[in-house]
Image (cartoon, rainbow, N blue to C red):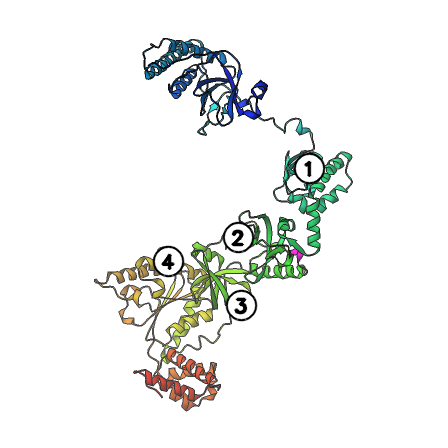
Amino acid sequence: MRPTVHLETFVFLTTRQPIENLPLQSLKPEMLFQEDEGLSIITTKDLAESNGFLDYTFPCKKISLAVHSSLEAVGLIAAISSKLASHGISTNVVSGYFHDHIFVPLGKEDAALQVLQDMMKAAEHIPSDDSESEIMEVINNNTIASSKKDTEDNADDTAETVNYAPPGTICEVHNLYQSKRDDNGRTSWTKKKPDDLPSTGENSESAQYALIVRHVKCYDGRKPLQIHSIVVQSEHLKKVLGEVLDGYPGVTMTLERVEFRSPFKPFVHRWERFASARDQELDSVTKSHVELLYNILEEELRDTIARKNDLVLNGVVTHDLLWTIFEPEDEIFSMVGGRPRAFRFKSGETNCRTGAFDLEAQYVDFDGDDFGLRDKDFEVAPFAGTMPITALPVFPLRHRSDQISVRDALVARGAVWESYKGYHFKYYEGLAVGRYMRREFKFNIKSRIIIDAEAFNTFNPDESVSVYPTCGKELTDDERLLAAPTLRGYSLKEKRWLEFNLDSVKEIVWDSQAFDSLVLPQDQQDLKTLILAFANAQSKQVDSFDDVVQGKGRGIIMQLSGPPGVGKTLTAESVAEVMKVPLYVMSAGDLGTSASRVEEALKDILRMVPKWGAVLLLDEADVFMEARNSTDLWRNELVSIFLRMLEYYEGILFLTTNRAGNIDPAFESRIHVSIVYPDLDMTSRRHIWQQFLTRTAGAEQFSDKQLETLAGVSLNGRQIKNVLKTAHLLAWSQEKPLAYEHLQTVLKLRDATSPTANGV
């Protein structure tokens, strides 16, 4: 049976309210919601009340389309919306549980009514035996066809009557406004300016006033409102505040409008200055403007300032008022790594996640090229009640009773630190800090070090340091106060880039007898003079002779060959000691085994050592110097790399080998001096025994016969040193001075454990 299509003539302005709030008898137009105003086309689904809510309607004009049937409302709504859109009428569809609403803008009612009338005429011609789906199809088809025809007609009319200017040629602004979000949260852009824009509070009228004070609700139970922010517009007031807040970070009083926000930190920190400015002799207008702001802030900040003054007077502070005692650019004090440090305070805020008071500060450092500032963060964990200010992990230096003496000591330390700019060769005894993969490691160092921040950054790029280069070439006392008490450099013994404590750096005690202690056979004594002459000439760049290729062949390479313990290493050590330069010792194990790793390590070392004027000793160099052959390709590659690197080395290099006869011929042209050390003879051994005993127990305690007996034992220099060390430990355990008997005991022990030993 054909569903009933009932056409009625009602137009509604609609609002949905709880029944008890809006009786039907009292319904009036002004009670309608603004966002629901407009023409409402309602497809009636159910006229019953729902959950205590009812659609109240205000009669407007007499036209509407209502369908009382099971016909799908969604299809009808879509047809109506499409038809209206084709006539340039925007729609907003709101799907309710009982009714579907199509809202059209006010002022578009007449056009919308005409569209509805056309649709009703189409519905009147539906045959009585048509099915429900056919009824819907007739309405939709009519709508689409009509829409298409209207669009074509409009296009024709437009083409005849409207002439548009070329794109981008009209020197005007075409404003578009964002529409309200639909049910899916989407927006679009429209030419129509929104009707519900709030009125602006700051305009030409408000610009007349010296101050704009913004208020917000307050929920602390003491007052209903509190000040959110203050905008200073008075030129008289800005001039006074420019002096009061001079140098305060983030405040520029020359702006047209200067805004301060609660809790008004600049005024809390500079309140005494502001009060003094208020008492100065000012013209009447300026004085009234200053008085106006002072009275507002005095009432707003009275409690905060009074609490702060009371706490500071008693030398304590609460966590919530920590910000009041830290003023930007304050000198603050902290113990860092057990050492007193001073920093420049920049800013502080309470961390909303942890509740801690986080501080940002700066200190002076050196990156190898420039002095400058680096950042340092601190944290004051939450605490209950009050805490002594000087018990905080960081606090303003002015709160120390001995601030003058502390400041003087830190400035003096900063001057010493400044003097270590550049390269320095020193002795170090204490803890040093190294970093790897962002982790910090501590090392107990007792050796010679090289202080060189520039090399630290160059050869240790993963831990390089950078600064904001805000300081000059020479520091002021204020900058020396903030200097970091750490020096960056290299530990020669540990072969690590480390940070050293300034207080643990000492001068080197040189061994002036080192070269005299070097024992060589009688017929080779002149070689000591030759070696030293070569080394001194190279260190002073006396030899200006260069290779055909720039930079090649400018180093001095000496080969020391012979069995272990005959003085090869001691030769290099003695040369470095006499020249008072660093000795960099490396072995094949330090360089790795792969060709690429060896090349990379050698490249850095051969660049680094000449920079320091150091002596380089490559111990046990046989693996890099052994003659190449056709079967061992890996060794051949290492030898080739080493030969190529030596070409461009510009320093002093000692190569020690145990097998002089198996050296690759290519090295012969690169080695300037080659010395072969024979096994120690009895005379040499006696000399070595006498030297060691003189330095320890005193050689005069030993008779010539005893020395002859000791020299008769076939030991090399290193073995003699080890015997003496063991004998010293034995004497110490017996609480006796070192004696010949202790040496005999150690040598007999050695005879019993060493199959090659020939004892006393």
Which residue corresponds to mark 3?
506
The numbered mark, 4 or 2, whose residue comes first in the sequence reads 2
Q: Main secondary structure of the magenta part?
A: helix
Residue depicted at 63% across the width and 27% down the height: 203
State whether residue 328 is above or below residue 390: above
Q: Quadrant of the N terminus?
A: top left
Residue at image mark 1: 238
- Residue 148 vertical position relative to residue 238 in the rendered view, above or below: above
* Amino acid type indicated by mark 2: Asp
Res 194 visible:
no
Residue stretch in magenta: 397-401
Q: Which residue is mark 2?
A: 370
Q: Which residue is tagged 4? A: 603
Q: Amino acid at mark 3?
A: Lys
Q: Nearer the viewer, residue 390 or 299?
A: 299
Compute the Cα span from label 1 to label 4.
Answer: 62 Å
